[in-house]
Image (cartoon, rainbow, N blue to C red):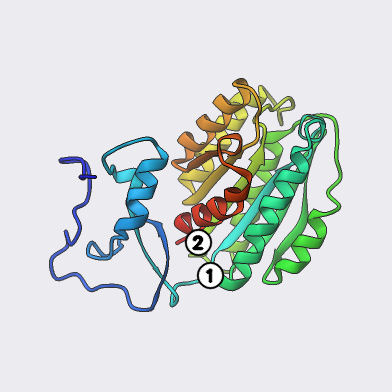
Amino acid sequence: MPFLDGDTARIGGDDGAPTSTGRYVRARRRHPGDCGNDIAVDASLRAAARRGETVIGTQDLRVKGRDSETPALVTFVVDSSMSMRAHGDIRTATELATAVLRRANRRDDYVAVVAFRDEQADEVVPPTDDPAVATRQLEDIPVGNRTPLPAGLLAAYRLVERERESIPALPAVVVVLTDGRPTVGIAGDPVDETERLTRRLGAADVDLLVLDLDRGTSGTDICRTMAAKAGGEHVRIAEVPPPDRARLVAETVDSLRR
């Protein structure tokens, strides 16, 4: 699988650039300032394959994450609306979040949980380095009737900004679990607001992973657009065999975190 000519960084492209120190424990997305000779080729190949491509583009490049790197803040934004409950997707969402929370414990990451329903979004678990706390709370998320997706995204954005007041360079990943059908906006059209807020997350250097739980097409279109606007990742859960879901999601979060 070759690299795209003229549109990718080449392996070992920064001659003489030092390799990051520490043991290679995961692969993550490439950020400005990363060493050019620290590309994780295996993970870059997998990222391109997930897009159905046979060449590696700049958006697929992954570098080796080291055990000496700063812990990240991983915020789960969980859709607890009626449409999610109707098909049992709330359980799927909480099971996936729980799997990643357990992995976060081994990474020394901070985790937080935001749930949105009706016309509100609640920070049900403030940032903690004890994922067991978040896991317990996920088992009892309140469920509503409507889908205020913009409120959930705004709550996550504000949470990250608040934590960065104490740790300015804090790496942040927001994981949205939704069927992508916003019905309530903050002050305007919910779809337009969803797109604006995902762009804001991307502009704030927040990595976004959208876990698409839609069973049709309209929700999937919105989920895919959300990821694209933020320069993040989109995973359609229905296309992933149940035994592979937790592993894939955990690996994707690892690839996004700095």
For the point 73% across and 24% down, the residue is 183
Q: Quadrant of residue 221?
A: top right
What amino acid type should be assigned to the residue bearing mark 2? Answer: Pro
Q: Quick check: 222 above or below 172? A: above
Q: In the rendering, at what x and y percent does residue 101 appear? A: 66, 62
Q: Are marks 1 and 2 in contact (CB under 8 Å)?
A: yes
For the point 81% across and 58% down, the residue is 137
Q: Which mark is residue 171?
A: 2
Is 157 in front, or is 63?
63
Left or right: 23 as drawn, with respect to 188: left
The CA span between labels 1 and 2 is 7 Å
Question: Mark 1: which secondary structure?
Answer: loop
For the point 57% across and 32% down, the residue is 223
Residue 29 shows in this picture: yes
Q: Quadrant of residue 159?
A: bottom right
| Residue at numbered disc 1 | 71
Q: In the rendering, at what x and y percent does residue 251 appear? A: 50, 56
